[in-house]
Amino acid sequence: MPVHSSAINIDALLARVPLFNELEPDEIARLARGTRELTVARGDVIFHKGDTPKGFFLLVYGQVKLAFTSASGGEKVVKILDQGQTFGEAVMFMDRPFMVFAQALSDSLLLHIAKSAIIDELDRDPKLGRKMIAGLSMRLHHLITDVESYSLHSGRQRIVGYLLRDQPDETTEELTVTLQTSKGIIASRLNLTQEHFSRILHEFSEKGLIVVEGRRIKIPSVEALRTYDC
């Protein structure tokens, strides 16, 4: 179960959250008073599907997955969250229970910002509302992109997109990437079975498109990988 951590500079961490970066120090201080720290160990469940949201979360360090369990008992990973990302904002405003569960993939530190603190600040400053709407709209855009990827792209194209997700289109030369987490979790995130994911990586390796070294993957030519199976 999550537990409280030792004291950290909550104000400074909140000030770096994109949703809050236009707020004044006194506004950040009010949010900080409605914020608590949580330390979680790898494997700890932060919240379960069906729990009632009482705020949202900032991941200070570590890694968290959002997922749900299908009727057949299989797990579908919806999102893999890394340092500095927030989650839980949308459902917090809907007054509905969480539709997924959140579980730590590594030892992590989180901040929980209370819904009451957010509502109070929204009443004081409409700018925060505009920022939150923009942030939630961007997440909706990413969700639509994900659905499009699952519907229109092959498994190979999904994996190429994941490996090159942070690379600009003009990148063509050698590159080394590190997988965020285990292959099984990444496969679920890409709507693939772990076997299918591993089979495609093996195919890429056989073609000389990648060199797999544990979680490190060397890509001799980004251009060759990007244009494979197009």
Image (tube, rainbow, N blue to C red):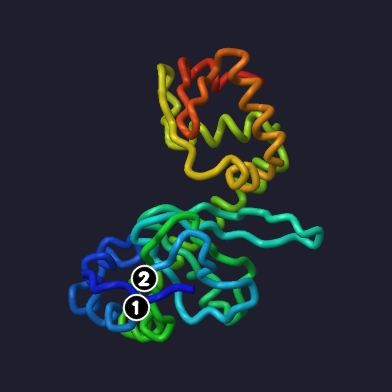
Is the Cβ of the residue at disc 2 closer than 8 Å to that at disc 1? yes
Up-down relation of residue 211 to residue 99 (above or below): above
Where residue 48 appears, x then y in whole percent? 60, 72
Q: Is residue 222 left or right of residue 144?
A: left
Towards the viewer: 162 or 1: 1
Towards the viewer: 57 or 27: 57
Q: Residue at x 54, y 22 (%)?
A: 226
Quick one: SS at disc 2?
Answer: strand
What residue is shown with label 1?
Answer: 36
* Residue type, label 1: Arg
Up-down relation of residue 46 to residue 189 (above or below): below
Q: Is residue 230 visible?
A: no
The label on residue 19 is: none
What residue is shown with label 2?
Answer: 111
Q: CA distance from mark 2 to mark 1?
A: 6 Å
Disc on the earlier residue, 2 or 1: 1
Q: Residue at x 65, y 31 (%)?
A: 198
Where residue 78 appears, x then y in whole percent? 60, 55
Towards the viewer: 5 or 176: 5
Check the picture and name the quadrant holding the C terminus.
Answer: top right
Where residue 142 appears, x then y in whole percent? 54, 50
Q: Residue at x 50, y 31 (%)?
A: 214
Quarter holding residue 91: bottom right
Up-down relation of residue 199 to residue 89 (above or below): above
Q: Residue at x 27, y 63 (%)?
A: 21
* Residue type, label 2: Leu
Where residue 63 appears, x then y in whole percent? 44, 55
Q: Residues within 10 Å of mark 2 (few under 14, many from 20)?
A: many
Q: Is residue 8 visible?
A: yes
Q: Is residue 201 left or right of residue 35?
A: right
Q: Residues within 10 Å of mark 1 (few under 14, many from 20)?
A: some
Up-down relation of residue 113 to residue 63 (above or below): below
